[in-house]
Amino acid sequence: MKKIVIFVLILFGFSWWTPALGKDDNARAIKRIQDLSHQSVKLGSYRALIIGINDYEDPKIPDLKTAVVDARAMAQVLRDRYGFEVTLMLDRKATKKAMFQALRKLAVSIKRDDSVLVYYAGHGDLDRVYKDGWWVPSDATAGKPVMYMDNVQVQKAMCINIGVKSPFDSFRKYIFNH
């Protein structure tokens, strides 16, 4: 008996809710697909910082085989298919200083409506004390976290011009305000 009642309630709930889905379709329909393009100026620019490191200076950090190939492929797809402006940093050019400067440059130049993607292919490490992570730049010394790029720096760079402290803050605001 319980199974039948539950099934009926689910069926009733679904049939009651389904027509409501179609009612607002026209109100929310996209009138002009061209308006979804960043070239329409109705959306911000599309920008990407792509980092790929195979070659590490410290011999104690093993070199990788596919990080640079992956980074180049990602850059090409973003440029060619989606019109992103791409900054590409590969191997020995991806030092901690260079990564930090690229993130800061991105942070001060992005606007609220811009779409920003940061892609990192390389070694990473976990901080078991702070429960956080790092990206390992090409000039890092193995076992010396002070030489690594902290994930918090990346998060700050992405959030500075959109008025949130963390990428998750905007998600929380969206969830709790809708």
Image: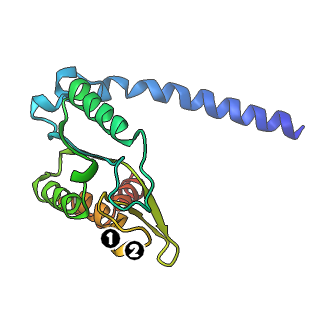
Does residue 32 appear in this view? no
Residue under the point 16% across and 32% down: 38
Residue under the point 31% across and 29% down: 28
Label disc, if present, on residue 144 of the rendered structure: 2
Q: Residue furthest right?
A: 1
| Left or right of 175 on screen, residue 100 | left
x and y percentages locating residue 1 in the rendered image: 90, 37
x and y percentages locating residue 103 in the rendered image: 20, 58
Q: Residue furthest bottom?
A: 129
Q: Residues within 10 Å of mark 2 (few under 14, many from 20)?
A: few
x and y percentages locating residue 130 in the rendered image: 47, 76
Q: Measured along the vertical axis of the image, is residue 177 above or below residue 90? A: below
Which of the 4 quarters of the picture holds residue 177?
bottom left
Say which residue label 1 marks.
147
Q: Secondary structure at mark 1?
A: helix
Residue under the point 37% across and 25% down: 25
What kind of residue is marked 2? Lys
